[in-house]
């Protein structure tokens, strides 16, 4: 799966939030300053071309739906990120944030608890 640009990720966040819809719906989900309609439309078409969206023609417009779940994208993105920057070591990732004081001991204990007691 191809890594999305910042602009594409912002569009996908809006699309996932809406669970699909029309470009005007996605535009409403964006925070200020909102991108121009034509820019968002171009981004959405690129996302469809890349396989992230499905579309259905409805009258004079298209209804877009996610072709990939947000959770699946996050998993693939994080795997690639950890592989590229931390030699595929999640331990090194957590250690990086711990050394940089971006994660607290309490949060680490919560993570350990999640690992030891996964929800079934």
Image (cartoon, rainbow, N blue to C red):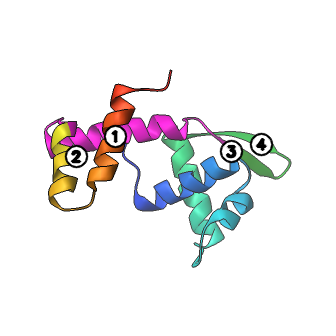
Q: Relative to 107, is 69 on the left or the right?
A: right
Label 2 and label 4: CA atoms lie apart by 45 Å
Name the image quarter holding residue 84. Answer: top left
Residue marked by disc 3 = 19
Q: Residues within 10 Å of mark 1 (few under 14, many from 20)?
A: few
In which quadrant of the rendered image does the N terminus lie? top left
Secondary structure under tag 3 reads loop
Secondary structure under tag 1 reads helix
Residue marked by disc 1 = 111
Q: Nearer the viewer, mark 2 or mark 3?
A: 2
Toward the viewer: 115 or 29? 115
Q: Nearer the viewer, mark 1 or mark 3?
A: 1
63 is within the stretch colored magenta: no
Q: Which residues are magenta?
A: 64-90
Q: Residues within 10 Å of mark 3 (few under 14, many from 20)?
A: some
Residue 28: image tag? none
């Amino acid at each position: 799966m191809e890594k999305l640009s910042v602009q594409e990720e912002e569009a996908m966040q809006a699309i996932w939030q809406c669970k699909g819809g029309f470009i005007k719906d996605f535009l409403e989900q964006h925070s200020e300053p909102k991108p121009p309609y034509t820019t968002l439309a171009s981004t959405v078409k690129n996302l469809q071309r890349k396989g992230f969206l499905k579309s259905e023609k409805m009258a004079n417009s298209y209804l877009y739906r996610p072709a990939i779940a947000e959770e699946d994208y996050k998993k693939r993105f994080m795997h690639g990120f950890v592989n590229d920057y931390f030699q595929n070591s999640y331990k090194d990732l957590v250690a990086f944030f711990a050394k940089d004081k971006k994660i607290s001991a309490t949060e680490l204990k919560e993570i350990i608890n999640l690992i030891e007691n996964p929800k079934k």
